[in-house]
Amino acid sequence: MKWSNLEQALFSAARRIPADDRVPLAFEKRIMSRLSSGGAKDLISMWAAGLWRAAGPCLGVMMCLVVWSAVIEPPSQDHLALDLESTLLAPLDEIGEIW
Amino acid sequence: MKSAGLEKRDKLETPEIAPDLPNDAVLVKAVQEGDVASFEPLVQRYQPRVFATARRYARRVDEVEDIVQEVFIKAFRKISTFRGDSPFEHWLMRLAVRTCYDFLRKHQRNKETTFSEFTVDEEHWLDGLASRPAGTPENAAAARAVVEKLFSQLSPSARLVLTLFAIEEKSIKEISELTGWSVSLVKVRAFRARAEMRKCLKRIGLEKYL
């Protein structure tokens, strides 16, 4: 007997074994109870669904901010520069007061 | 995932399917619209096929039940993606085969690395095989045990492809559809599986039956 014959003999023996399609009693009830208890929902899909739900409100807030920033008068560049300078130098001023 | 109702494991049955149940398309549409109860007839209808598939890859009762449970829960979760281009049964069997493959890969590290010796019955069966090469000897239990021992030594992809190709006699195209692998990948894996099986036959000492 050759290798291929041995293989074929094993495969044909395996093919002759009937597929065991028996089912445990009321197995479908077990599946349905798992599904109805909510165990079917996994964390990833719940997280994804939450993100999708949050996308709408986030978009709305973003649009409001865009409109608001376009409507209000933009601050002058001089004020911005002064504000930045005073913020940066604030710690130094505090040190001066201590000494 | 551990199955509940372990005490009922020995009570196996081949369920009768009521002929007056609505067809798959109606049931699937109802489930897609949120009617969870319509999923039960689908489980009832296809669980024998899914059990038969799972038993080709797992031996222990709890493992088989876990695989089947996972298949149906995945099917329920993903049913919104089923568009009805092919029969529901094909879609479900693809899911079943992929779940079985995932199971094999997950349990690859846990599988027995040492080969357990053949029993007297199995030795007799192999002797009969060697003396009657034209026809395989009787004793289905011994044949099943020998084939299972042999297959348990193979890699997940080799086991899957050999089961589908050599035992279930699926074509390369069908295997490609079931597994999601390309046709050329299936061919390559089938070729490697043959080589792996030959090595395995040598390793477990079946060459003496040549």
Image (spheres, coloured by chain):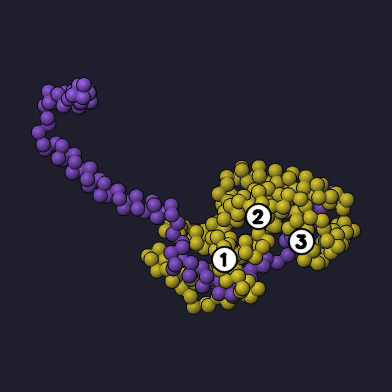
Q: Residue at x 84, y 50 (%)?
A: B205
Q: Between label 1 and label 3, give the one nearer the viewer.
A: 1
Q: Position of residue A28 (x, y in %)?
A: 53, 71
Q: Between label 2 and label 3, give the one nearer the viewer.
A: 3
Could you say which is closer to the camera, residue A1 or residue B150? B150
- Disc 2 to disc 3, C-alpha distance: 18 Å
Q: Position of residue B93 (x, y in %)?
A: 56, 59
- Disc 1 to disc 3, C-alpha distance: 25 Å
Q: Give the quadrant of the N terminus of chain B.
A: bottom right
Q: Position of residue B32 (x, y in %)?
A: 40, 63
> Which residue is under mark 2?
B164
The amino acid type of the residue labelled 1 equals Ser
> Which residue is under mark 3?
B145
- Point out which mark residue B100 bears: none
Q: Earlier in the sequence, mark 2 or mark 1?
A: 1
- Disc 2 to disc 1, C-alpha distance: 27 Å
Q: Residue at x 78, y 62 (%)?
A: B143
> Which residue is under mark 1?
B3
Q: Identify the chain of the residue marked 2, using the numbered disc in the image.
A: B
Q: Position of residue B131 (x, y in %)?
A: 90, 58
Pointers 1 and 3 within a single chain: yes
Q: From this viewpoint, which residue is outermost toward the left?
A: A73
Label 1: state its secondary structure.
loop
The amino acid type of the residue labelled 3 equals Ala
Chain B's colour? yellow
The reply to whether residue B178 is visible in this rendering is: no
- Chain in purple in the render: A
